Amino acid sequence: MGWNLLTKIDVRVQAFADLKVLDLTHNYVTELPKEIKLLSNLKVLNAGYNELKFLPDEIGQLSNLQELHLHFNGIKELPASVTQLTKMRTLRLSFNKLYHLPADIGSLNRLREVFVTGNQLLDIPTSINQLDHLSHLYLSQNRIEVFPVELCILQKLTTLDLSQNLLAALPEEIGGLRGIVHLDLGYNKIKALPDPLASLPVIKTLYVNDNELPYIPSQIIVMLGKLESFRIEPNGFDVPEDAKKSGLKAVQAHLKKVARS
């Protein structure tokens, strides 16, 4: 049913009671019918790229749902019933108009992937620390001012994207992200990097570009040597082109000089 000109879904959906995957992408659907609750065997609901403004409370009755894709709509708030979807593994909400996530999002303790890029989020619910299986979290392009310290106990989190927010500081607890591999903190207002950042054991990618860092701390400079990819410019310092061309050791030497000055 994707890539059509649909504006609504027939309320007689019970005729498809055995349906496991429903693809409504790239249409003009403005609302999902309450009768969607009758699709009790549904495992994947993809309603991305539509014109949804809200979801019916009845969506919480899709007890077998594992993937919910709602990216590129106009949704401003999720019904609390979404937290009843306890089998869900993937939640895709990017590019909507959300200011908050449900307070009880921690109830979705099978979640592996959460995509909320391009919304208006101001904060993250504290219950997110209950998502023990969460591995990928994308929060880029929001309005988050305080790093969600609750994330720092999630040992299975491998990818965290908080770029293009309003972060000014990072907590010491960030060293608790022992499983983090890819960490993107670019395009914020961060003024200092805490030393525990250098102790992350398996990190391979670190982006701290486009912040307000006056220098890179010595422990972080050493850490750069084990990374596969890093971005540290622009900030309150410059790395000369000749240092970049000469390789990592030259870059590290220059950063140490800046840190001492």
Image (cartoon, helix red, strand yellow):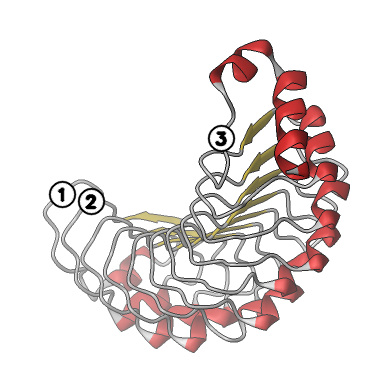
Label 3 and label 1: CA atoms lie apart by: 51 Å
Q: Which residue is mark 3?
A: 238
Point out the tag, 3 or 1, that comes first from the N-terminus: 1
Q: Can you give x and y, in whole percent of width and height, for residue 70 in the image?
A: 38, 62
Is 123 positioned to the left or the right of 12 in the image? right
Point out the tag, 2 or 1, that comes first from the N-terminus: 1
Classify mark 3: helix, strand or loop: loop
State if disc 1 and disc 2 touch (CB < 8 Å).
yes
Query: Which residue is rendered at x = 71% and y = 35% of the image?
Result: 255
Residue 4, labelled with which disc? Answer: 1
Mark 1 burial class by Cα count in 10 Å: few <14, some 14-19, many 20+: few
Q: Which is more foreground, mark 2 or mark 1?
A: 2
How many numbered discs? 3
- Identity, as a three-letter code, of the amino acid under mark 1: Asn
Q: Which residue is mark 2?
A: 26
Q: Can you give x and y, in whole percent of width and height, for residue 50 in the image?
A: 23, 60
Query: Which residue is rendered at x = 51% and y = 71% of the image?
Result: 144
Indicate whether 63 appears above or below 4.
Answer: below
